[in-house]
Amino acid sequence: MLKVVVFDGGYGGEFFADQLESELPILEVIRVIDWRNADQILTSPRKARRVAKNALRPYIGKVDLIIFANHLLTITSLKYFRRKYKKQKFLGLSLKQPDTFIRRDVLILTTKAVTRTINYYNFLFHIKRKVETMTPDDWPAQIDDGELTESEIRTALETSLAHKQFKPEEVILACSQFSDIKNELRNILGSNLKIYDSFSDTIRNTSKILRIRGGVGKKPKK
C-alpha cells in the first residue's frame, strides 16, 4: 500500500487527511500533526520549516509522498524540501485561484505570515478582481479548540468590511483550518457563496504523482 504523510500543526491537517482517505482509500495516510508547535508553524516560514524538518525526519525517504497541509510551508518551503531531499516526493496546499471568469468580489481568509511573503503578492497580482484580505490569526487556535462561533465570525466579517464597498461572492481559504467553517461562511454571506480551498487540487495532484486513478490505486496503462 502506498504511504502518504500529511503534515500540519492543527485540525486543518486532520480535515485534509480525512478527505484524502475518503477520495483515495487505496492510500495509507499517516497523520503527523505537531500540535505542540502549531503556533510556530503559522508565524514565520523559518520557524515552520524548522518544525517540519524535525517532525518529518523519521519519514523522509521512507514514504511515497509527504504533503504539507499548510499554505505557508507550501508557498515558502516546498522547493527547499524538494531540493534538499531529492529522493522524497513532496506536495502541498497551494493558493487557489478562482476558476470562473465572472468578476465577483473575492475575500481571502489567511494568516499574516502568508500575506508577508512575495508569493502572496504574486498571487494577488494575478487575481483580476476586487479583492480583500482578512487575517484572523486567532481563528485557527479557536477552531482547534472548538471555540469559534458563527456569531464571532459574523462580527469579525462585518467589522472588517463595514466601511468598504465590497460584497464577497467568492471566498478563498488560505489556511487549512478554515475549511471547518464553510457552513458558517455560507450562513453569513449567502448560500450561493463560492468557496475555494486547495484540498481537491492537492488530491488530484496526489493521484498524478503516485500514478493512481479513480481512488482504487490502478496505474494508468503505458
Image (tube, rainbow, N blue to C red):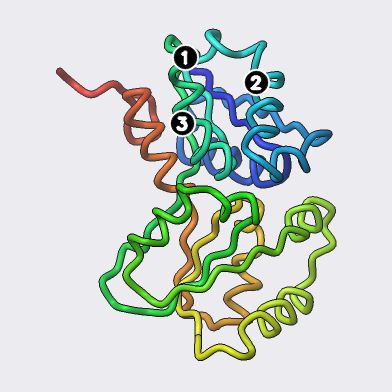
Task: Name the residue located 49 percent from the left edge and 13 percent from the top edge.
Answer: 85
- Rendered image quadrant of residue 154: bottom right
Count residues near mark 3 (Cα–Cα under 10 Å), then give few for <14, some for 14-19, many for 20+: many
Disc 2 marks a residue whose amino acid type is Lys
Identify the mark at residue 53; answer none if there is no mark: 2
Task: Name the residue located 15 percent from the left edge and 18 percent from the top edge.
Answer: 222
Asked whether 5 or 133 is in front, the reply is 133
Q: Of tags 1 and 2, which is closer to the observer?
A: 2
- Rendered image quadrant of residue 134: bottom right
Name the residue carrying label 1: 88
- CA gap, disc 2 to disc 3? 15 Å
- Rendered image quadrant of residue 153: bottom right
The image position of residue 4, as x and y in percent, is 53, 23
- CA gap, disc 3 to disc 1? 10 Å
Q: Is residue 84 above or below residue 173?
A: above
- CA gap, disc 1 to disc 2? 13 Å
